[in-house]
């Protein structure tokens, strides 16, 4: 049974303190609390945490019943709350508002008359939501948890937002921890438009990611439902071995993208993606481990014959602006199957567009097929539910992985592809200097020593030693050319070494080391000519043809793409960003011809 409620004001603002028309502040032992008026009335929320206000109760609370309230911008520690929240410019860097509470005596849920918010959320927003949750749920004999109590949809009336569907059923137990959680769906979601110009249908969208608040240490994997909400993946979602998290593309192509980190937007044509989940092993594991689809190293993988591709993004509160910020790119590090363009509209840079040129898919496949070393990277056959062939081309990185691991029935790449070129580079720099200009650690000068090591030195600093790499090290960024440091940080020895190695990997992939004796980690206007990239042989033809068939940017005039793992070196990747609340992102699957 539900009832219509009167206005309950929760004033969210940065000012501290808010008066109460009822409810006496008391302290019982070490536990402070506020008496719930037995005749009904308001109970104030303590200020000082960025928001305050009051709760209103109907008459009927037993005399002397008090409630302890704890407002917070962070989820209660150990609560494992599902994600939801506000993204208010008045918030700090955390887009959530929580109110945990306990009552000293059992009272019916229905005595809490309702909730109304005002002051923190823009009045032009329409979608609001509150949750009432039990944070200490009892577990039934069947092992079922009663932790979630109810959702309370809201309606914006201008100056206040009314939550008028509080259910009367149930009891708030004594000394039991509960929480109210508040959000504006409009504020925490970004308009995502998906346009299918490929001529292939049906089209499906699967969005996955992680908790946008990194400090929450949330181990769960999430998917996005059709309402734009983050939902934890759970092994209970499996049916016939797979979970169905795909959203059929709406007729208008409009979806909602919530705040999330490590996000991916998968688009498939012809059939839905089949999502695999592994069950938890330990007591602290999430309810499911997501198994990322692979179209390159397992011919029996359920999506191997599916026509799919994806973009990667982070959509989180920016610490610089305290507003939602988006960083997004099309990645080709693993494979190419669908030609995408990505356009983002925002206040910082207006409209930014990256992605595939017209006719990119057919041009990429033709160029790869024409090169004997790279031709085997193409996955032939017709994609399920379509007449599209071939299905994809995988990266040489994955081709090498398949050779190393003797994987049958999948693309391969020669392990010695760069061997002669590496020998020439090492011979050249036995007698010549190779200059390395780092992002934040100064300039180093390298020479190959008698032990066949490239040794970079800098006055007053330690030497950086890089062993002679193999072809696999070059392409994968492995072995001698170890993993990258994504951002210039504290100049620790490890960071310096990693930056040298990852930059050298980029130079080998672009085949610049015999024609340009300088390595640079970050873009410097006029310091290099991008026309030299991929001009020599051998080179990473896979990355070369992807760049040649990608739209340019100011820093990547010959095409911006993510053709290998360190292609963000010198800002040649397709990454675009706006940290001041971008208004929309559009992903277009362009024509295959």
Image: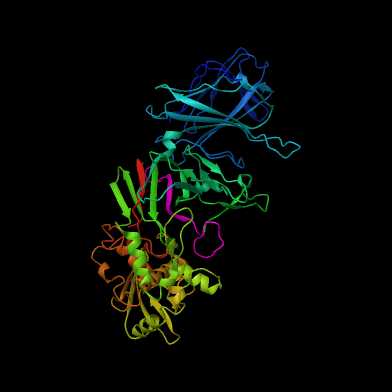
Residue 180's spot in the image, x, y percent? 56, 30
Q: Nearer the viewer, residue 106 or 109?
A: 109
The quarter of the displayed image where residue 44 is located: top right
Q: Nearer the viewer, residue 287 or 57?
A: 287
What residue lies at 48% left-to-right and 47% top-to-bottom?
Answer: 206
Q: Nearer the viewer, residue 378 or 193?
A: 378
Quadrant location of the N terminus in the rendered image: top right
Outermost residue, left side:
526
- Answer whether residue 193 is visible to the viewer in this image: yes
- Answer whether residue 582 is visible to the viewer in this image: no
Residue 539's spot in the image, x, y percent? 35, 74
Task: Please state the extent of the stretch shown in magenta in the rendering.
Answer: 294-322
241 over 51 or under it: above or below? below
Residue 298 among those drawn in magenta: yes
- Is 227 left, or right, of 364 in this rendering? right
What residue lies at 43% left-to-right and 56% top-to-bottom?
Answer: 387
Outermost residue, front side:
387
Residue 573's spot in the image, x, y percent? 35, 60
Residue 7's spot in the image, x, y percent? 49, 18
Quadrant location of the C terminus in the rendered image: bottom left
- Is 327 left, or right, of 531 in this rendering? right
106 over 244 or under it: above or below? above
The figure's colour scheme reads rainbow
201 over 369 or under it: above or below? above
What main secondary structure does the magenta stretch of the protein show?
Answer: loop
What residue lies at 27% left-to-right and 67% top-to-bottom?
Answer: 530
Residue 247 among those drawn in magenta: no
What residue lies at 50% left-to-right and 46% top-to-bottom?
Answer: 246
């Amino acid at each position: 049974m539900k009832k219509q409620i009167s206005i309950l004001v929760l004033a969210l603002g940065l000012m501290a303190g808010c008066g109460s028309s009822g409810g006496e502040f008391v302290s019982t032992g070490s536990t402070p609390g506020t008496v719930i008026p037995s005749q009904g009335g308001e109970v104030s929320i303590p200020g000082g945490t960025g928001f305050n206000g009051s709760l209103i109760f109907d008459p009927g609370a037993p005399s002397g019943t008090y409630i302890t309230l704890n407002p917070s911008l962070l989820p209660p520690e150990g609560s494992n709350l599902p994600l939801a929240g506000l993204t208010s410019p008045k918030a700090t860097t955390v887009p959530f508002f929580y109110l945990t509470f306990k009552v000293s005596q059992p009272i019916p849920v229905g005595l809490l008359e309702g909730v109304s918010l005002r002051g923190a959320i823009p009045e032009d927003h329409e979608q609001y939501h509150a949750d009432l949750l039990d944070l200490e749920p009892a577990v039934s004999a069947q092992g079922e948890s009663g932790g979630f109590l109810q959702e309370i949809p809201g309606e914006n009336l201008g100056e206040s937002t009314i939550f008028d569907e509080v259910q009367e059923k149930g009891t708030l137990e004594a000394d039991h921890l509960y929480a109210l959680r508040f959000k504006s769906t409009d504020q925490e979601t970004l308009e995502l438009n998906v346009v299918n110009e490929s001529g292939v249908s049906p089209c499906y969208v699967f969005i996955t990611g992680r908790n946008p608040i990194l400090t929450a240490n949330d181990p769960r994997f999430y998917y996005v439902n059709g309402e734009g909400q983050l939902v934890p993946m759970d092994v209970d979602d499996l049916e016939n071995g797979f979970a169905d998290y795909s959203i059929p593309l709406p007729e208008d192509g409009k979806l909602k993208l919530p705040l999330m980190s490590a996000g991916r937007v998968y688009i498939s044509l012809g059939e839905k993606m089949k999502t695999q989940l592994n069950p938890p092993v330990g007591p602290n594991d999430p309810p499911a481990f997501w198994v990322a689809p692979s179209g390159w190293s397992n011919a029996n993988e359920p999506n191997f014959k599916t026509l799919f591709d994806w973009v990667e993004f982070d959509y989180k509160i920016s610490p610089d602006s305290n507003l939602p910020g988006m960083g997004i790119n099309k990645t080709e590090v693993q494979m190419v199957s669908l030609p995408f363009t990505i356009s983002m509209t925002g206040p910082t840079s207006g409209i930014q567009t990256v992605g595939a040129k017209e006719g990119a898919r057919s041009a990429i496949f033709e160029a790869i097929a024409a090169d004997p070393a790279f031709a085997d990277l193409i996955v032939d056959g017709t994609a399920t539910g379509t007449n599209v062939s071939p299905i994809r081309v995988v990266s040489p990185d994955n081709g090498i992985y398949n050779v190393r691991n003797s994987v049958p029935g999948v693309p391969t790449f020669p392990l010695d592809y760069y061997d002669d070129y590496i020998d020439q580079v090492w011979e050249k720099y036995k007698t010549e200097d190779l200059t390395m200009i780092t992002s934040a650690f100064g300039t180093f000068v390298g020479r190959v020593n008698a032990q066949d090591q490239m040794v970079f030195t800098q006055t007053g600093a330690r030497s950086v030693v890089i062993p002679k790499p193999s072809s696999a090290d070059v392409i994968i960024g492995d072995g001698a050319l170890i993993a990258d440091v994504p951002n210039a940080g504290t100049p620790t020895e490890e960071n310096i070494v990693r930056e040298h190695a990852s930059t050298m990997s980029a130079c080998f992939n672009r085949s610049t080391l015999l024609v340009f004796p300088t390595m640079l980690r970050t873009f410097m206007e006029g310091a290099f000519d991008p026309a030299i990239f991929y001009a020599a042989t051998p080179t990473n033809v896979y990355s070369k043809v992807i760049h040649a068939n990608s739209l340019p940017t100011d820093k990547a005039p010959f095409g911006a793409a993510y053709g290998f793992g360190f292609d963000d070196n010198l800002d040649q990747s397709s990454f675009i960003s706006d940290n001041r609340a971008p208004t929309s992102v559009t992903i277009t699957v362009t024509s295959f011809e």
